Amino acid sequence: MKFLKGLHKDELFRYGSVMFVASIISNALNYIYQIYMGRALGPEEYGVFGALFAIFYMLAIVSNTLGTSTTSFVANLAAENRKIGSFLRGAFKRMILTGLIFSFAFFLARNNIASFLKMPNAEPVVVLAFILFLAWIMPITGGTLRGLKRFYALGSITVSSTFFKLISAIALVTLGYGVTGALLGAAIGSLVAIFISLYLIAPYLKQSSHDSNFNFSAFYSYSAPVLLAMFCFSVPSNLDVILAKYFFSAHVAGLYTSASVLGKIVFFFPSAIYAVMFPMIAERHTRGEATGGVLKKSLVYSFLLSGFVVATYILFPRLVVIFFGSRYLEALPLIAPYGLAMLFFSLSTILLNYHLAIKNMRYVVIFAGFTILEVFLLLIFHNSPLEMIYVLLSVNFALLIAGLIYTLR
């Protein structure tokens, strides 16, 4: 009984459980989304779909950087009992303008991108440009809720967004819109998340305070190393899919994409943990309180969650792969090693978020060094999908060991 009461009082466990449940539901819907797209599109088109999504995740690192920075600044302002209205209004103005410029540049490059990915037309790239614009707004709304520790609302938005993405994409693909329809579904899901989030943070946007003109210089100076961190966070989990589409045939690239989708379940599974951990660490660090206990519990919880998924892949790989259909059974040998590589990377991500929360940017340099090494090795060793996965496995394991040694010291 005392143990259960202790867990209930544990802020990380309580909010982590909320985000974990939301993550389970959201990941399940995302899994259905990926499986349906894999079956409906076939390996060739699914390879294009996977490559475009990988490009999106890599380009969205700039906007995701602002989400992490927003969480940090909102958590710090809340810890100091300061109002956040001025900061939010300034952030939205800057992000909308920047998002328009960024997306328009991507739109202009649509034909070159389509040619590089061997696509018959650039229509899906145009949809992706719109999604990238939305990606500049979402981190501000989501980062604000995360910084305020509104995890019940954040979890509900995550599930709602994924649900609308799924049903919209299925309807559009069924109507014959192919990859374009799959991406339009993602855009609709993003719009739902933005509208709900804006409704929830509207009272904060109306706040007035003595900080009528928030000084964004500190925000920018913090965001610069965070941008590097987010880039290094994004590359190991996305670049390999793009390279697979470039180096391998359309069929083999589709098989590799299916393995990467399953592997990323391991990677995104503990996202609920560091989503909760970050504002807790930032707030405690601002107040001068100890943060090591929260980090240790975060690592343990993440290992248990990701480890369970990896164990499933090792013991029952055919059960998992079969969901994509018999055309993807050739990907069977890729599942377990890819999942293990993502297990190591997910634990390294916990360490990365910890150091960002306490504003220790030296760890970012370590992370960046291993990212460069991984890119270099992938460009050399790509004779087969399994060879590329072994590169991920080796580098991610070395990164985790280096990160643990640095953090413990």
Image (spheres, rainbow, N blue to C red):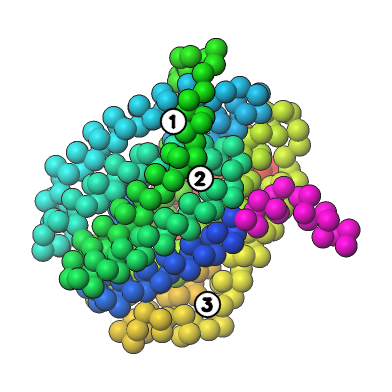
Q: Amino acid at mark 2?
A: Phe
Residue 245 in the figure: left or right of residue 77: left
The reply to whether residue 319 is visible in this rendering is: yes
Q: Of the residues tagged 2 and 1, which is closer to the observer? A: 1
Q: Residue shown at 64%/54% (left/top)? A: 16
Report the Cα–Cα distance between label 3 and label 1. 37 Å
Q: Of the residues tagged 3 and 2, which is closer to the observer? A: 3
Q: Is residue 14 magenta?
A: yes
Quick one: 37 or 328, which is closer to the camera? Answer: 37
Q: For the C terminus, give its image quadrant.
A: top right
Report the Cα–Cα distance between label 3 and label 2. 27 Å
Residue 74 percent coordinates (x, y): 56, 31
| 3 or 2: tag closer to the N-terminus | 3
Q: Residues within 10 Å of mark 1 (few under 14, many from 20)?
A: some
Q: Is residue 15 magenta?
A: yes
Q: Which residues are magenta?
A: 1-18
* Residue at the disc numbered 3: 313
Secondary structure category for the residue under label 1: helix
Residue 359 percent coordinates (x, y): 59, 32
* Residue at the disc numbered 1: 224
Quick one: 16 or 374, which is closer to the camera? Answer: 16
Q: Residue shown at 50%/40% (left/top)? A: 200
Quadrant of residue 408 in the image? top right
Asked if disc 3 and disc 2 are in contact, CB closer than 8 Å, the reply is: no
Residue 274 percent coordinates (x, y): 59, 49
Quick one: 204 or 268, which is closer to the camera? Answer: 204
Numbered label attached to residue 367: 2
Q: Amino acid at mark 3?
A: Tyr
Q: Amino acid at mark 1?
A: Ala
User: Where is 286 relative to 23, above or below?
Assistant: above
